[in-house]
Amino acid sequence: MSHADLPSLTDLRAALIEHEAPAEALRIVDTSSNAVEALELLAEAGLLPFSGHPVAALVESFAPLLEPGCGPLAAELSGSEFLGLLRDGIAEEDLVDALASMIGDAEAFGSREALAMLRVFAVLAPPEVRPMAAEAADRLVASGLKDPT
């Protein structure tokens, strides 16, 4: 997953407008330094989820992991890059809370991409949130989603 695979603030703002997000959500995006920070601030403000799902752009950035030929090594490299970008974008003391929020949002979104994201977090995220990610992924599988192969 390259930097280009992550949603831009412009894309996130457009998705929020399309889904008729409140003005406060747009203000948060406008004052954020990147999409990951914006999503975390939106979650902290209680603005996720609303009609539509602004977390979609983040979750869908894991779609390349579902493509034929994407093996475990490529998935781990992509996941490591994503987590590295996240670590660069937020304070270390906020990392576990940010990931916990993303895990909840991904589970609520409930797509195959969300499941891929959760499986990556279950292996590569800090130890404090790995079980949370694994349990959320298991619940998605129990609901009928198939694990990425």
Image: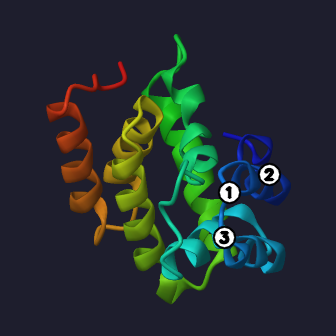
Helix, strand or loop for disc 2? helix
**Label of residue 22 in the image:** 3
Helix, strand or loop for disc 1? loop
Identify the residue at horizontal 36%, vertical 24% (top origin): 148
The answer to whether residue 125 is above or below residue 40 is: above
Q: CA distance from mark 3 to mark 2?
A: 13 Å
Identify the residue at horizontal 41%, vertical 36% (top origin): 116
Q: Position of residue 17 (x, y in %)?
A: 75, 55
**Label of residue 20 in the image:** 1
Check disc 2 and give the amino acid type.
Ala
Q: Position of residue 30 (x, y in %)?
A: 83, 74
Q: Position of residue 82 (x, y in %)?
A: 60, 53
Check disc 1 and give the amino acid type.
Glu
Near mark 3 (Cα within 10 A), the count class, few <14, some 14-19 or many ≥20, is few
Q: Nearer the viewer, residue 133 or 16?
A: 16
Q: Does 33 sit left or right of 24 as displayed?
A: right
Q: CA distance from mark 1 to mark 3?
A: 6 Å
Identify the residue at horizontal 48%, vertical 77% (top origin): 46
Q: Nearer the viewer, mark 2 or mark 1?
A: 1
The answer to whether residue 141 is above or below residue 117 is: above
**Residue under numbered circle 2:** 14
Q: Earlier in the sequence, mark 2 or mark 1?
A: 2
Helix, strand or loop for disc 3? loop
Check disc 3 and give the amino acid type.
Pro
Q: Earlier in the sequence, mark 3 or mark 2?
A: 2
Q: CA distance from mark 2 to mark 1?
A: 10 Å
Report the residue that reaches farthest toward the top: 68
The answer to whether residue 123 is above or below residue 30 is: above
Q: Position of residue 135 (x, y in %)?
A: 19, 51
